[in-house]
Image (cartoon, helix red, strand yellow):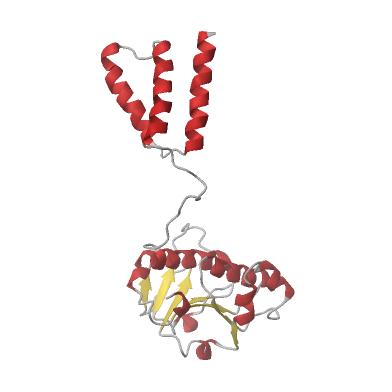
Amino acid sequence: MFKNISFILHKPQLSENIGACARAMKNFNFSKLIVIDPKPTFPNDKIVATSVGAREIIKKSKIYESLEPAIKNIDCLISTTSRFRNKNIKHITLNELNKIDFSKKVAFLFGPEASGLTNNEVSFSNYVLQIPSNSKFKSLNLSHSLIIVAQAIFQLLNSKNSKYSKSKKIKIASKKNIQAMSNLCIKNLENINFFKPKEKKPKMLENLRSIFYKMDLSEKETRILSSVFASLGKKKSD
């Protein structure tokens, strides 16, 4: 579905923003960039430099002189805006993007930095998307707007499959490791008469063990904590 989604920059004014938009797209696995009547020469060295590792997006982008031919193959066009449009077009929020059928060709349209999209340009849209922001300062940088939208779509399309995983080099501590560490801690706490009053000791032990076991510690971390507890106990006995 990522390949069905395009990002359209309409009359962008700054090379840095164009490059930053390409970079933002690659951050979230998008590759189709359309640029309409850019003010700077396209492409140029500054655009390529600010795109960092997204040069291929710049290289493969499509350039048009006007909006209409750029969207002739788009099934659903969503215009982004910082202000409410009093037009008979459906307004949609970031949280409502799950209503969009991303199996079709969908494009997000962004206006020039200084003025945004005109009502005429918005009239080509199926939806208007307004990014929530400070009501007293709604103007967002072009690349910032794009990255917010890109991240929202990425999360929507990838939520079931995108999971953070720990390094394979990290070994999770076994119950035996945690038990040995917690027993050492408890032993040293008993030596300093920590568990007072005695009738509360069982509950205190329960809470302490609960803390250790739910921390999802690694073997290395349990060894470090065990060394700390052993050192504290040794210091007390000295």
Q: Nearer the viewer, residue 37 or 220?
A: 220
Q: Nearer the viewer, residue 121 or 197?
A: 197
Query: Which quadrant of the figure contains the N terminus?
Result: bottom left
Q: Residue at x 41, y 40 (%)?
A: 216
Q: Nearer the viewer, residue 114 or 33?
A: 33
The answer to which quarter of the image holds residue 59 is bottom right
Locate residue 44, reporting x and y percent.
72, 77
Query: Which quadrant of the figure contains the C terminus?
Result: top right
Residue that extends furthest to the left in the rendered view of this protein: 199
Locate residue 231, reporting x and y percent.
53, 19
Q: Residue at x 28, y 20 (%)?
A: 202
Residue that extends furthest to the top in the rendered view of this protein: 238
Left or right position of 11 against 103: right
The vertical placement of 118 against 176, above or below, is below
Whether residue 84 is visible here, answered yes or no, is no
Locate residue 138, reporting x and y percent.
50, 62
The vertical placement of 55 against 138, above or below, is below
Whether residue 211 is visible here, answered yes or no, is yes
Locate residue 25, reporting x and y percent.
54, 70
